[in-house]
Image (spheres, rainbow, N blue to C red):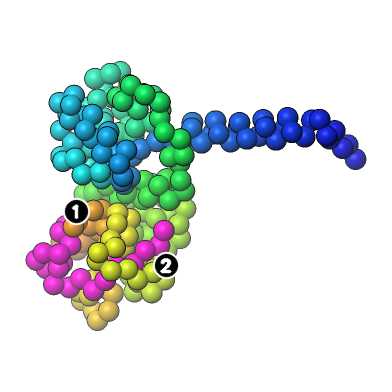
Amino acid sequence: MHVLSKQRKPIICLMFMLLMLMCSVAFASFGYGDRGDEVVSIQKRLVELSYDVGGVDGSFGQGTETAVKAFQRANGLEEDGVVGETTYRALMNRDMPVNRSGARTSALRNVLRTAYNMEGVPYVFGGTTPYGFDCSGFTQYCFASAGISLSRMADSQYYESTRISTSELRPGDLVFFSTYAEGASHVGIYVGDGRFIHAGTSTGVAVSNLFDGYWGSCFIGAGRVM
Protein backbone atom coordinates (compact mmCIF):
# COMPACT_ATOMS: atom_id res chain seq x y z
CA MET A 1 0.00 0.00 0.00
CA HIS A 2 1.28 3.42 -0.93
CA VAL A 3 1.80 5.66 2.11
CA LEU A 4 1.85 9.45 1.85
CA SER A 5 4.98 11.10 3.16
CA LYS A 6 4.70 13.40 6.16
CA GLN A 7 5.73 16.30 3.93
CA ARG A 8 2.95 15.69 1.38
CA LYS A 9 0.08 15.30 3.87
CA PRO A 10 -0.07 18.99 4.94
CA ILE A 11 0.08 20.09 1.29
CA ILE A 12 -2.81 17.81 0.30
CA CYS A 13 -4.85 18.97 3.30
CA LEU A 14 -4.23 22.59 2.36
CA MET A 15 -5.26 21.94 -1.25
CA PHE A 16 -8.44 20.22 -0.05
CA MET A 17 -9.33 23.18 2.20
CA LEU A 18 -8.76 25.62 -0.65
CA LEU A 19 -10.94 23.53 -2.94
CA MET A 20 -13.76 23.49 -0.40
CA LEU A 21 -13.50 27.26 0.03
CA MET A 22 -13.61 27.77 -3.72
CA CYS A 23 -16.70 25.57 -3.95
CA SER A 24 -18.48 27.45 -1.19
CA VAL A 25 -17.84 30.74 -2.93
CA ALA A 26 -18.74 29.43 -6.38
CA PHE A 27 -22.16 28.26 -5.29
CA ALA A 28 -22.92 31.26 -3.08
CA SER A 29 -26.07 33.20 -3.95
CA PHE A 30 -29.03 35.16 -2.64
CA GLY A 31 -32.43 34.19 -3.98
CA TYR A 32 -36.11 33.76 -3.31
CA GLY A 33 -36.82 32.91 0.33
CA ASP A 34 -33.58 34.32 1.75
CA ARG A 35 -33.78 36.76 4.63
CA GLY A 36 -31.39 38.92 6.61
CA ASP A 37 -29.26 42.05 6.71
CA GLU A 38 -27.50 41.31 3.43
CA VAL A 39 -30.88 41.07 1.68
CA VAL A 40 -31.69 44.50 3.13
CA SER A 41 -28.46 45.83 1.61
CA ILE A 42 -29.33 44.33 -1.78
CA GLN A 43 -32.83 45.83 -1.65
CA LYS A 44 -31.51 49.27 -0.66
CA ARG A 45 -29.01 49.23 -3.51
CA LEU A 46 -31.72 48.26 -6.00
CA VAL A 47 -33.92 51.10 -4.74
CA GLU A 48 -30.99 53.51 -5.10
CA LEU A 49 -30.81 52.43 -8.74
CA SER A 50 -34.57 53.12 -9.15
CA TYR A 51 -35.73 49.48 -9.14
CA ASP A 52 -38.97 48.72 -7.28
CA VAL A 53 -38.46 45.87 -4.78
CA GLY A 54 -41.89 46.20 -3.19
CA GLY A 55 -40.46 47.28 0.18
CA VAL A 56 -37.11 47.08 1.95
CA ASP A 57 -37.93 44.41 4.51
CA GLY A 58 -35.01 41.98 4.44
CA SER A 59 -37.11 39.29 2.77
CA PHE A 60 -36.16 38.20 -0.76
CA GLY A 61 -39.64 37.87 -2.26
CA GLN A 62 -41.22 38.26 -5.67
CA GLY A 63 -40.70 42.03 -5.74
CA THR A 64 -36.99 41.70 -5.11
CA GLU A 65 -36.67 38.84 -7.59
CA THR A 66 -38.39 40.93 -10.29
CA ALA A 67 -36.11 43.89 -9.55
CA VAL A 68 -33.02 41.68 -9.74
CA LYS A 69 -34.15 40.32 -13.12
CA ALA A 70 -34.63 43.87 -14.39
CA PHE A 71 -31.14 44.83 -13.17
CA GLN A 72 -29.64 41.73 -14.79
CA ARG A 73 -31.42 42.44 -18.07
CA ALA A 74 -30.22 46.05 -18.10
CA ASN A 75 -26.64 44.96 -17.44
CA GLY A 76 -26.40 42.06 -19.87
CA LEU A 77 -26.34 39.40 -17.14
CA GLU A 78 -28.10 36.06 -16.98
CA GLU A 79 -31.71 36.91 -16.10
CA ASP A 80 -32.45 34.34 -13.41
CA GLY A 81 -33.47 36.56 -10.49
CA VAL A 82 -30.70 35.12 -8.32
CA VAL A 83 -27.94 37.32 -6.92
CA GLY A 84 -24.92 35.16 -7.55
CA GLU A 85 -21.27 36.25 -7.61
CA THR A 86 -21.41 38.12 -10.92
CA THR A 87 -24.69 39.90 -10.22
CA TYR A 88 -23.65 40.71 -6.66
CA ARG A 89 -20.39 42.29 -7.79
CA ALA A 90 -22.12 44.32 -10.51
CA LEU A 91 -24.82 45.50 -8.12
CA MET A 92 -22.92 46.02 -4.88
CA ASN A 93 -19.43 46.84 -6.23
CA ARG A 94 -17.83 44.36 -3.83
CA ASP A 95 -17.22 40.64 -3.56
CA MET A 96 -19.92 38.24 -2.44
CA PRO A 97 -19.90 37.21 1.25
CA VAL A 98 -18.75 33.62 1.75
CA ASN A 99 -20.94 30.74 3.04
CA ARG A 100 -24.21 31.51 1.27
CA SER A 101 -24.86 27.94 0.12
CA GLY A 102 -26.57 26.29 3.08
CA ALA A 103 -28.62 23.17 2.39
CA ARG A 104 -31.87 24.66 3.69
CA THR A 105 -31.50 27.82 1.60
CA SER A 106 -31.02 25.76 -1.55
CA ALA A 107 -33.91 23.42 -0.76
CA LEU A 108 -36.23 26.29 0.15
CA ARG A 109 -35.44 28.07 -3.09
CA ASN A 110 -36.28 24.95 -5.10
CA VAL A 111 -39.57 24.40 -3.26
CA LEU A 112 -40.77 28.00 -3.65
CA ARG A 113 -39.60 28.39 -7.23
CA THR A 114 -41.38 25.17 -8.22
CA ALA A 115 -44.53 26.27 -6.41
CA TYR A 116 -44.68 29.62 -8.19
CA ASN A 117 -43.92 28.01 -11.53
CA MET A 118 -47.07 25.91 -11.06
CA GLU A 119 -49.38 28.92 -10.60
CA GLY A 120 -52.45 28.52 -12.79
CA VAL A 121 -52.27 24.72 -12.98
CA PRO A 122 -55.87 23.46 -12.58
CA TYR A 123 -57.18 21.53 -9.60
CA VAL A 124 -57.65 17.83 -10.30
CA PHE A 125 -58.80 15.48 -7.55
CA GLY A 126 -56.01 12.98 -6.99
CA GLY A 127 -53.69 15.01 -9.23
CA THR A 128 -49.94 14.88 -8.62
CA THR A 129 -48.48 16.37 -11.82
CA PRO A 130 -48.29 19.76 -13.60
CA TYR A 131 -51.31 18.64 -15.65
CA GLY A 132 -53.39 18.97 -12.48
CA PHE A 133 -52.93 18.89 -8.68
CA ASP A 134 -54.97 18.37 -5.59
CA CYS A 135 -53.70 20.12 -2.46
CA SER A 136 -51.41 17.44 -1.06
CA GLY A 137 -50.31 16.31 -4.51
CA PHE A 138 -49.11 19.88 -5.07
CA THR A 139 -47.12 20.13 -1.83
CA GLN A 140 -45.68 16.67 -2.36
CA TYR A 141 -44.54 17.63 -5.88
CA CYS A 142 -42.96 20.92 -4.77
CA PHE A 143 -40.98 19.37 -1.94
CA ALA A 144 -39.88 16.48 -4.15
CA SER A 145 -38.17 19.10 -6.36
CA ALA A 146 -35.85 19.73 -3.42
CA GLY A 147 -35.34 16.03 -2.68
CA ILE A 148 -37.73 16.05 0.28
CA SER A 149 -40.25 13.22 0.50
CA LEU A 150 -43.74 13.96 1.84
CA SER A 151 -46.60 11.56 2.40
CA ARG A 152 -49.41 11.68 -0.13
CA MET A 153 -52.31 12.94 2.01
CA ALA A 154 -52.79 16.25 3.83
CA ASP A 155 -53.48 14.64 7.20
CA SER A 156 -50.33 12.50 6.92
CA GLN A 157 -48.27 15.58 6.04
CA TYR A 158 -49.74 17.27 9.10
CA TYR A 159 -48.64 14.50 11.46
CA GLU A 160 -45.18 14.02 9.95
CA SER A 161 -44.28 17.73 10.14
CA THR A 162 -43.11 19.51 13.29
CA ARG A 163 -45.79 21.72 14.86
CA ILE A 164 -44.93 25.44 14.95
CA SER A 165 -46.86 28.52 16.06
CA THR A 166 -48.03 31.24 13.67
CA SER A 167 -45.39 33.58 15.13
CA GLU A 168 -42.71 31.10 13.98
CA LEU A 169 -43.98 30.83 10.40
CA ARG A 170 -41.38 31.30 7.68
CA PRO A 171 -41.46 30.65 3.92
CA GLY A 172 -41.46 26.94 3.12
CA ASP A 173 -43.55 25.88 6.11
CA LEU A 174 -46.71 23.86 5.53
CA VAL A 175 -50.05 25.37 6.56
CA PHE A 176 -53.09 23.22 7.23
CA PHE A 177 -56.86 23.72 7.16
CA SER A 178 -59.96 21.83 8.16
CA THR A 179 -62.32 22.13 5.18
CA TYR A 180 -64.53 19.29 3.96
CA ALA A 181 -63.51 16.92 6.77
CA GLU A 182 -62.49 17.20 10.41
CA GLY A 183 -58.74 17.54 10.92
CA ALA A 184 -56.17 18.48 8.29
CA SER A 185 -58.02 18.13 4.99
CA HIS A 186 -56.26 20.90 3.03
CA VAL A 187 -52.60 21.95 2.89
CA GLY A 188 -50.52 24.68 1.29
CA ILE A 189 -47.04 26.23 1.45
CA TYR A 190 -46.44 29.46 3.36
CA VAL A 191 -44.64 32.07 1.23
CA GLY A 192 -44.40 34.97 3.68
CA ASP A 193 -46.34 38.20 4.34
CA GLY A 194 -49.38 36.27 5.57
CA ARG A 195 -49.83 34.43 2.26
CA PHE A 196 -49.65 30.82 1.12
CA ILE A 197 -49.68 29.02 -2.22
CA HIS A 198 -51.88 25.98 -2.71
CA ALA A 199 -54.03 23.99 -5.12
CA GLY A 200 -57.57 25.17 -4.39
CA THR A 201 -60.63 23.41 -5.80
CA SER A 202 -62.02 26.64 -7.30
CA THR A 203 -58.75 28.41 -8.13
CA GLY A 204 -56.21 25.78 -9.09
CA VAL A 205 -52.69 26.65 -7.92
CA ALA A 206 -52.89 30.19 -6.56
CA VAL A 207 -51.67 32.44 -3.76
CA SER A 208 -54.21 33.21 -1.02
CA ASN A 209 -54.32 35.14 2.24
CA LEU A 210 -53.72 32.87 5.20
CA PHE A 211 -55.42 34.77 8.00
CA ASP A 212 -58.41 36.55 6.44
CA GLY A 213 -61.70 35.35 5.01
CA TYR A 214 -62.46 31.72 4.39
CA TRP A 215 -58.94 30.38 4.84
CA GLY A 216 -58.45 32.25 8.08
CA SER A 217 -61.63 30.71 9.46
CA CYS A 218 -60.54 27.12 8.80
CA PHE A 219 -56.79 27.42 9.47
CA ILE A 220 -55.79 24.83 12.10
CA GLY A 221 -52.00 25.07 12.29
CA ALA A 222 -48.62 24.93 10.62
CA GLY A 223 -45.79 22.43 10.36
CA ARG A 224 -42.14 22.47 9.39
CA VAL A 225 -40.36 19.78 7.39
CA MET A 226 -37.06 21.55 6.66
- Please provide the residue range marked out in magenta: 204-226
The disc at residue 151 is 2
* Residue 137 image point, x, y percent: 34, 61
Q: Residue visible at 21% across and 29% down? A: 46
Residue situated in front as seen by the camera: 170 or 197: 170
* Residue 189 image point, x, y percent: 29, 58
Image quarter hosting the N terminus:
top right
Quick check: 223 above or below 132?
Answer: below
Would you say residue 221 sits in the magenta stretch? yes
Residue situated in front as seen by the camera: 167 or 114: 167
* Residue 63 image point, x, y percent: 20, 39
Q: Residue visible at 46% across and 46% down? A: 102
Q: Quadrant of residue 37?
A: top left
Residue situated in front as seen by the camera: 114 or 105: 105
At label 1, the amino acid type is Asp
Q: Is residue 153 visible?
A: no
Q: Quadrant of residue 152?
A: bottom left
The disc at residue 193 is 1
